[in-house]
Image (cartoon, coloured by chain):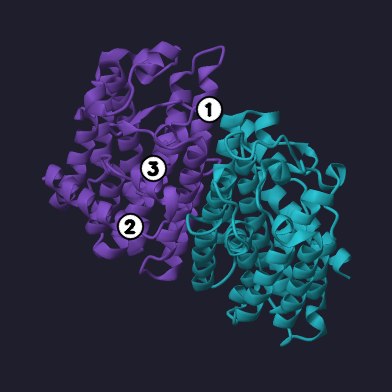
Chain colours: A purple, B cyan
Amino acid sequence: MFDRRIAEVAAAVSARLDAALAPMPGEIGAAMRHACGGGKRLRAFLVCEGAALHGVESAPALDAAAAIEAMHAYSLVHDDLPAMDDDDLRRGLPTVHVKWDEATAVLVGDALQSLAFDLVAHMALPAERVVTLTAGLARAAGGRGMVQGQALDIAAETAAVPLTLAEITELQAKKTGALIEWSAQAGPVMAGAETGAMGAYARALGLAFQIADDILDVEGDEAQTGKRLRKDGEAGKATFVSLLGLDGARKEAARLVETACEALSGHGAEADCLRQAARFVISRQS
Amino acid sequence: MFDRRIAEVAAAVSARLDAALAPMPGEIGAAMRHACGGGKRLRAFLVCEGAALHGVESAPALDAAAAIEAMHAYSLVHDDLPAMDDDDLRRGLPTVHVKWDEATAVLVGDALQSLAFDLVAHMALPAERVVTLTAGLARAAGGRGMVQGQALDIAAETAAVPLTLAEITELQAKKTGALIEWSAQAGPVMAGAETGAMGAYARALGLAFQIADDILDVEGDEAQTGKRLRKDGEAGKATFVSLLGLDGARKEAARLVETACEALSGHGAEADCLRQAARFVISRQS
């Protein structure tokens, strides 16, 4: 059920992104389209499934899903820059600064962030809800959200002492957790409903996702993941695996999946797809 | 009158930015504060003066003014990067990538763009108007606005044929004009009023501003402008001065100032400060 649903969402959100990106001119436009291609579309899935769970129509849900995928794509383009993680491979393709150049990669990320807010601002919803989504997205992405997480991650590379478990948990809650939480809460916000359960679900799922990422970095296959692996170990960075061991990390991820599912206890079978998504994030091979 | 008013606005918007930036943690926070310091605050002035002209309260006007200055500051930090214009001096101080490093400069720009949308989303205004301001800001900043202008500017550096006057006019309308136009229209948007006159004023003022910038690049003093000059001539780039000559450029800027003032013909003495601002942009020494 989950497989089919995320494939449907991925196709729909890619079409929505294609439409939003089509008018973007020049090489920047081409590079924006390159940056937004592929990916699991997990964030889009969370938006669309959370929206469906709360009875929201698919048109505004797809706008919000496209917005968060544009924001996510911007963060990847900038993270891959030589001055940041210096990655040449992403989603199985050359990164933007490799295929084009650094200036283009900076501008593409900048324009994709603007596009995310553009998409949210044009959603067919009561204006109050659009403003709530905009404010939440700005906080999640900004200097106390995703950007702070990325800055903490870069600082950790040159820190004299490896990060503690609490510090890594905090870092990841900002770096990847903030956008995941926005995604899961977008549905209830669009519906004018309570966001507490979806927020708790997303916080547990986001952390489980990151632990699975650290496990994949050790055990995964570059051809399957479409990105460079084994960089954290080489850099001597603390990860959930280095701190908990492989087995401990697996157990913690499984525990978080249970926490995520428990957060949905107020919903019946209609939330099963979200429960499956939580199990998927720790079993995925890419 | 204009001198006093822009100084008042500069002080007020700097205080508003300080308050918004105070919670930003770590080195990124420090670098964000550095990037938002100084400057003429022309965009903030246009917001606040346009707001006053349309009877808008000062609190939301200052939020919008702080937002556009954060957006402008982000664009300067990224434009100054080694992969872009490679500038080491801005507003008389070392640029962010010189004082910190490139990764910090990328992240500071990213976080300042988010902050701009954060500030707009928290304005005390009817939600419909907040959404209009958000949508306009996203368009002005994005891949068909400021980012496109910057991309065209970079492409011009390596183009086989220098740009024509029409091409430079188009480039500048995007690169600097789009944010200036948003600034001038923010007042009427906040008031729910017509934006046509302020839009026409801003388009003429923005282009006059850029022509004056090209004149300053030839005639200006680095100590007074606080940034590197004579780079365009060295790079062999077409500018308004190279295409029109110094005298022709001065005449065109003066003509545009008249156009800007005529756009305000529906207003009386209460718009004199905006008329003075138009004259200021072509007489400034920095």
User: Which residue bears the numbered disc 1?
Assistant: A83
The chain that hosts pointer 2 is: A
Q: Which residue is mark 3?
A: A73
Find numbered disc 2 in the image and state the secondary structure of the residue it sits on: helix
Q: Residue at x 25, y 48 (%)?
A: A45
Q: Residue at x 49, y 67 (%)?
A: B131
Q: Name which quarter of the figure residue B54 lies in.
A: bottom right
Name which of mark 1 and mark 2 comes first in the sequence: 1
Task: Judge the density around disc 3: few (<14), some (14-19), many (≥20) Cα neighbours within 10 Å.
Answer: many
Q: Mark 2 or 3, which is nearer the eye? A: 3
| B106, B282: nearer the viewer | B282
Do the residues indicated by labels 1 and 3 lie within the same chain of the protein?
A: yes
Q: Are marks 2 and 3 in contact (CB under 8 Å)?
A: no
Can see residue A196? no
- x, y percentage for residue A105? 47, 39
Toward the front, the furthest residue is: B161
Instruction: Classify residue B255 as left or right of residue B111.
Output: right
Q: CA distance from mark 2 to mark 3?
A: 24 Å
Q: CA distance from mark 1 to mark 3?
A: 17 Å
Query: Is residue A258 shown to the viewer in this render?
Result: yes
Of tags 1 and 2, which is closer to the observer? Answer: 1
Q: Which residue is mark 2?
A: A188
Q: Quadrant of the N terminus of chain B?
A: bottom right
Q: Position of residue A69 (x, y in %)?
A: 35, 47
Disc nearer the start of the sequence (2/3): 3
Q: Chain of mark 1?
A: A
Reading the chain from its start, which is encountered first: label 1 or label 3? 3
Please, is residue B275 above or below residue A123 in the view?
Answer: below
Badge 3 amino acid = Ala
Q: Say which quarter of the image contains residue A256.
A: top left
Rendering quarter of residue B93: top right
